[in-house]
Amino acid sequence: MSQTINEITRRRTFAIISHPDAGKTTLTEKLLLYGGAVRLAGTVKSRKAKQHAVSDWMELEKQRGISVTSSVLQFEYMGHKINILDTPGHQDFSEDTYRTLMAADSAVMLIDAAKGVEEQTKKLFHVCRKRGIPIFTFINKMDRHGREPLDLLDEIEKVLDIKSYPMNWPIGRGREFTGIYERATSKIELFSGTGHGSTIVPTSVGDLADPAIVDAMSEPIYNLLKEDLELLDMAGDAFDQEMVHRGELTPVFFGSALTNFGVGAFLETFIELAPQPHEKTSNIGVIQPEHPEFSGFVFKIQANMDPSHRDRIAFVRICSGIFQRGMVVKHVPTGKSIRLSQSKQFMAQDATTIDEAYPGDIIGIFDPGIFRIGDTITEKSSFAYEAIPKFQPEMFARVHLRDAMKRKQFVKGIEQLTEEGAVQKFRSPDIGLESPIIGAVGILQFEVLQYRLTHEYGVDISLDYLPFNIARWATGENLTPKSLKTVDNLVLKDDDDNFVVLFRNEWAFNWEAQRNTKVTYLEHPPIRQL
Ligand code: G4P
């Protein structure tokens, strides 16, 4: 048992959230560099999916060889086991990001020093806040001309309604950003080197009483730092670790992922302060990670990760107990027993077989087609972890198969890709799966669906976009397609046989909701009963 506790204590499982372009790919890579997982930054191929053209996105997918979108990067650092949950950058894939955040114990919020808090940052921040997970802030691109640090802190507090505490302070700004001052220790770290950032940057460490350090700073930079520090000491809240863990205060770090300035210090302090895996809510109460029975939940499914194998991987966040390869687990929603003999862990492009894993870890297990997102697996108990919220789709399209001979592959492709959660699938109550209707959050998801159906299943489709942008799950007594139909809505069913009604807009929905009081409309599917 004590070994298990030791393993839990040393784990840190977190996700990086940001608006596209803030530098998430760069920072992830630099964390791997400083964590000793890669020797030269730039060896991990670009994992960003930010370009708007689907061809670019797919090109990146191809370059990666193996897709690690929203999967996990694991490495050892200073006695700790780090799991970085990777999330796609493009906002059309934010559902993927939301699901991934369910598996994280904390989040690093990355902010571009010139742009401040952006749209996508806000959305993702609120998901973290709702989950109550600690949020650490890294203000990036300090090597470029940006906004004043105090101004940025002010914006974080006002726009996101969270208290902030600068852990370090930038020495110089823009091109003259040459170091950081660590507030807890009064330690100064000055960077030297070319700032290309492919290797760990050399530093000289000292404090303000150290003549060599002071001499290395120009007078204006030294004076600015003195002024800033006086101001910080007078204003601002005290550091409170409890508040950090409750998600009420965000520790803020300044740095530049590109030049590596501040990355090492950030990683060190973050690992110290970030929470270890903690309890998770289930339908029988909270389950502690120390609970001896193995349990976890599926937060992501990905088909065809390796095109030559046509396999499907379910990503499981371990919540309690010890995972051992070959163990037999219970798939709670169906009660079926499954032997987990193929289990993988991912490091950049490489997948390696994993024999043992602990709470906080993410494992990829071979999915024989049984898992769905949110499913709980246990050793023998029948409890279920809290459901993973589904996004409300806002765009809909009817999918037509171009070549009727390919029907079998078409059905399989649509089934598998919707089970992955890439898009949501609905059908007309009367015509079944002939021409399914797909719901998505962003247009890029449709394009990716089309691309993947062609490339992974050899199926050509056409998409017929529909003029609806609201979906509601209808519940009530004796519902029929007829009782739900109006002149301009569309009545559908989801995979669990729930009625889903599409409306053109908020107004049309409100009008119908007020008129037909026999129906209760839900924003999300009713909870699946076990
Ligand atoms: P993302 O995953 O959040 O979308 O961002 P990504 O890391 O791809 O970074 C977006 C752009 O910002 C990249 O430039 C990257 O080099 C740059 N960047 C990241 N961190 C820093 C930083 O600390 N300072 C500066 N000055 N730039 C930074 P790009 O021109 O779009 O791409 P690339 O040609 O450099 O790859």
Image (cartoon, rainbow, N blue to C red):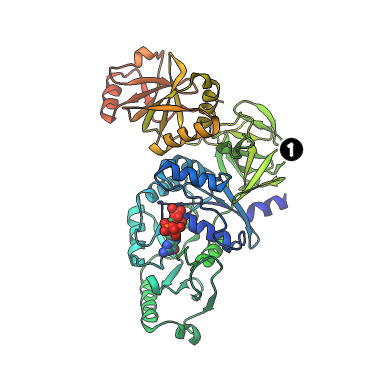
Q: Is residue 430 above or below residue 522?
A: above
Nearest to the observer: residue 213 or residue 242: 213
Q: Residue at x 48, y 41 (%)?
A: 96
Q: Which residue is mark 1?
A: 326
Q: Residue at x 38, y 70 (%)?
A: 174
Q: Is residue 383 above or below residue 202?
A: above
Residue type highlighted by circle 1: Gly
Residue 193 at least partly seen: yes
Nearest to the observer: residue 422 or residue 266: 422
- Image quarter for ligand 1 equals bottom left
Badge 1: few (under 14), some or many (20 or more) residues near its Cα, within 10 Å? some
Residue 136 at least partly seen: no
Residue 426 percent across, percent down from the top left: 44, 24
Nearest to the observer: residue 412 or residue 33: 412
Residue 25 percent across, percent down from the top left: 49, 55
In the displayed structure image, the side of residue 202 where residue 162 appears, left or right? left
Q: Residue at x 53, y 28 (%)?
A: 413
In the displayed structure image, the side of residue 412 where residue 52 appears, left or right? left
Q: How many marks?
A: 1
Q: Does any atom of ligand 1 lie closer than 8 Å to the CB of label 1?
A: no
Residue 68, picture quadrant: top right
In the displayed structure image, the side of residue 373 where residue 365 appears, left or right? right
Q: Residue at x 47, y 35 (%)?
A: 451
> Element at badge 1?
loop
Nearest to the observer: residue 137 or residue 286: 137
Q: Is residue 381 above or below residue 266?
A: above
Residue 436 percent across, percent down from the top left: 44, 22
> Which of the image's four quarters has the C terminus?
top right
